[in-house]
Structure formats: C-alpha cells, structure tokens
Amino acid sequence: MTHKIGFIGYRNHAKKLLDIVEEEDFEVSQIYHPTKNIEDSRITNNLEDLYECDAVVIASPNSTHFDYIQNLIENSNCLIYCEKPPVTSYESIKYLEELTEENKKRIFFGFNLRFSKFNDIIKQYSNSEKLGKIIQINIITSMGFAFKEKYLGSWRADGKNNLHNILENSSIHWIDLMIFIFGEYSNSDYFPRLVSNNGTSYDTNSVILEFKNGVACSIFTSYATPLIENIIIVGTNGFITIRDDTLEIFSPRDSFDKNGLFKKPPSECIDNFNFGKSVQESLKKSINYFLEHVEKSKKFDLNNFEKSILSNKLALTLQSRRN
C-alpha cells in the first residue's frame, strides 16, 4: 500500500525533511505553498488538496503552524508532523490542550533531539558509578548564521514577526530535551540579545533552567559567533565533556595529587563524537519514527504530545518576560 505524504514548505529545512521522506520510499504527492507557482507537478496553492493525504508534514514559518494544524485536525484524518515550536501563542496552546485525546495522538512535533545520542548518553550515565548524580548541564551551540547574506532576507531575521527566533528555532530543542529527560522545571530565566545588528530579531540568548529533581541547566545558543559545539555534564563523582568531536568522561571525584589535594580526575575517551552528524542522525530517526506510524496507520504516544506542549509553554513564558 502506498501512503501519500503532503508537505507544507519546500525549501531549506523543509527540503531536508522531504529528502529523508523520499529516501524511505514514501510518495510525496502534494507540496503546498499559499501563493507561489513552482515548476513541480506536486505543487498546489489549495490546502484542501492535502486533506486526502495519509500524513502531512508542516515545515513552514513558525507563526503559520497553528493555522495549518487547526485546518488539518478539523478537515482531515491524516497524521501530522509539525516542526518545532508547535505554536507561537498561548491562545494556540489552549486550542491544542482542549483537543480530544485521539486528535492529540494524531500530532507529532519535530523535537528530534529526543532521538539523539545526547539523550542516550545522559540516560546511560545518569546515577552511574562513574558520573554519580547529575547536578549541572552546560550547553553551548552557536555559529555565525546572522552574518550570512541570506539571513537578512529570511523570516528568522524579522523581529516584528519572529523577535525570539533563536529561542524558537535553536534553544527550544535543548529546552525540550532537558524537559523530556528531567521532567517538570521549577525555575527558569532567559537573557536574549541582538549581537550582530543584522535584522531585528534576537540572534543570541542564554536560558537557565532548574528542575524539580535538583538538576540545573544552562543553554547558550547564538547565530552571531564562530562555530561552537560544547556540552559538559557534571555529576557528583565525575563529569562528561563533548567537544572537538570527542566524548570524554573524567572520574572519580576522589582523585588526589601527591600532596593529598584534589586534582582533575583521569579521563577516558568513550567515543568519537561528531556533533553535527549526531544532530542530523537524530533528525532522520525522528522522521522515520513518524513514518513508521504512518505505515502502520498508528497514532502517537500521548506523552510525546504533552511533553511538547510543556516545552512550548516554557518558551512562551520566557518570551513574555522579555517582550
């Protein structure tokens, strides 16, 4: 049986998703754009053409997600893959929260780091003998996108409609991963900045999270720096670093020099770790997870939906403090 997939969006990240879907031998039968006429027989300007698809991928600008979700929920029976963030307002969150349980299970949000090696590592070493109890995670992921010419012409640089673009498009992945692993948070703070002076949206921010289980997390993301990919996971008996394509664990805590003073614990190289490759692999796993459900006409675990809404609400709460 051939399952027909519809797409909303066709360039940039949407093209990455489309390529993955086609690599898995699924038919992309419709590609929707509200206005453009593009030389592709699958292009349509009529959203109703997607209602008969088995599944639809929403990979359009963030501010459009809600209208498409609402249309598809109310006018079709398809499964829905929607890129993060799910929606961009509290009113839209309320609509999603009031959906029936069966309709909530139709929607899968694209928080692909849930399928990443980062997730596996934190879970593997949490409360392990080498690491002990995790108490702090520091994440720095940044690069110089805001200085590229194409950034200025993109919707991401438009502060009027996407003021918190770096939070919604980059930081939210790490926020979601932390919530997915550690559950409910107790405190949070957010420090956005426009560093490059290119465009009018924030291109740099820091997010601080404290979880009810005692873990604290610092997340720095930016489009205005050199490429930096650096994570440190601190436990009571050791710590893990991910940097320069290497994952190392330093343990035990009780390591002393000849004078009986604490010294840096001995290190063990656990893995060659390509940061960018791991993110791309998680994206493919995330799409494949969605496609497996499409193939089986199977709805999604409700927990996925609920954790996504929790991440979305936190992002909106952070934004409201800085608007």
Image (spheres, rainbow, N blue to C red):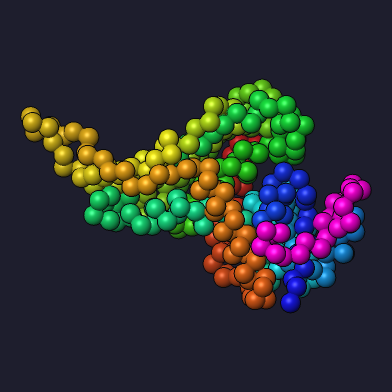
Q: Quadrant of the N terminus?
A: bottom right
Q: Position of residue 93 (x, y in %)?
A: 66, 57
Q: Position of residue 273 (x, y in %)?
A: 43, 44
Q: Residue furthest left?
A: 259
> Depth check: 192 or 240 in front?
240
Q: Is residue 43 magenta?
A: yes
Residue at x 61%, y 38% (from the top left corner): 166
Residue 71 in the image: state x and y as whole percent.
80, 63
| Magenta segment | 21-44
Residue 94 visible, this orientation: no
At 72% from the left and 49% from the top, the residue drawn is: 15
Q: Is residue 37 visible?
A: yes
Image point 7% across, 29% down: which residue? 259
- Left or right of 266 on screen, residue 139: right
Residue 37, compared with residue 230, is above or below; it is: below
Along the line of sight, the residue nearer the viewer: 47 or 192: 47
Q: Is residue 53 left or right of residue 206?
A: right
Q: Is residue 180 magenta?
A: no
313 is higher (above) or lower (below) than 261:
below
Residue 185 position in % (x across, y down)? 46, 52
